Image: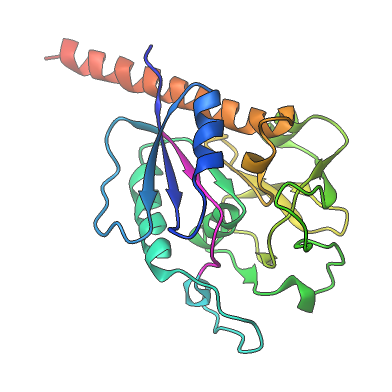
Amino acid sequence: MSAPLVLITIGYKNNVTPYAQAVARAGAIPLVAYAGDEGFTVPENVAGVVLGGGASVEPSRYNAEHDPTIKRSTDVERDDLEFSVLDQVIPRGVPILGICRGLQLLNVYHRGSLHQFLGYTDYKGNHRPEEHRAFLAHTVEARAGRLAELLGEGEIHVNSIHRQGIDTLGEGLKATVYSPDGLIEGVETDDGSILAVQWHPEELALTDPPSQRLFSDLVDRARAYSRRQTAEASKQLAAG
């Protein structure tokens, strides 16, 4: 079977290279869609999606007003792009991996809400240290689900580049990974079609096996999706 096509959504201010390299190392072909690609249609042969990190989700998406004490950092065009992408791929059953903002957007898409600034909450972890992007800021523990299978037992060290986090968990999502202060750091669906993490594995994947496994798993799921699509097309062709 040829390498599957994996769509990566990203903002113009964000570096897509680490995502694309991690996807390629896992054996897939990356296709990039940027915020502002108005009317973007997901190609039929896309077999996987990575929702990358970037700007905050517009608070009105989860029925909140922007807190004026927090510097606004949103990208409405990207929200539009990614909501449209999810509208197209979720009904198809295309596997998804969300990363940082991608986790937050998936939570909002599933009618959950976000803390606009973790500094105003009881969470005590340093989730956005003034360090380089690969700095290991804290640990997380995967307690159940597919993410536990991929990340292994016990705590692992991760980087952390976010000021926001999940408040109310979205419908149909399970929280399976947590940081020591109790913040949700990983979510997934029961069928394993959607996985998302709050840290940035693309920055660690070259040297950290658990990080690369997240991308390898997405590509494995993409291959399985492609096989199902091929089998279904063959059945329909045979049925005339």
Task: Kindly identify the residue that appears in the image at 17 percent across and 14 percent down.
Answer: 237
Q: As rendered, which of 12 and 199 lies closer to the eye?
A: 12
Which quadrant would residue 155 be assigned to in this image? top right
Direction left: furthest residue: 240
How far across and down, in percent of the image, does residue 131 sit?
Answer: 77, 58
Q: Quadrant of residue 239?
A: top left
* Numbered disc total: 0
Residue projecting furthest to the front: 132
Q: In this view, does 13 lie above or below 206?
A: below
In this view, 77 is above or below 220: below
Kindly identify the residue that appears in the image at 72 percent across and 51 percent down: 185
Looking at the rendering, the stretch of residues picked out in magenta corresponds to 48-57
Q: Is residue 204 left or right of residue 143?
A: left
Q: Quadrant of the image for the N terminus?
A: top left
Answer whether residue 55 is magenta in the image. yes
Seen from this angle, which residue lies furthest bottom? 68
Left/right of residue 211 with respect to residue 224 in the rendered view: right
The answer to whether 198 is drawn above or below residue 13 in the figure is above
Q: In this view, does 132 lie above or below 235?
A: below
Quarter assignment of residue 4: top left
Q: Which residue is drawn at 69% across and 67% down?
A: 163
Task: Name the residue at 87% across, 59% down.
Answer: 181
Please state the horizontal and vertical placement of residue 102, each as a whole percent of the image. Answer: 55, 53
Residue 77 is covered by the magenta coloring: no
The answer, for residue 240, to whether it is visible in the render is: yes
Task: Locate the C terminus by quadrant.
Answer: top left
Q: Tell me how the rendering is colored.
A: rainbow
Main SS, magenta region, reads loop
Instruction: Tell me residue 238's x, y (percent).
Output: 18, 10
In the image, taking residue 43 as reference, residue 204 lies left or right, namely right
The spot of residue 142 in percent (x, y) is 78, 40
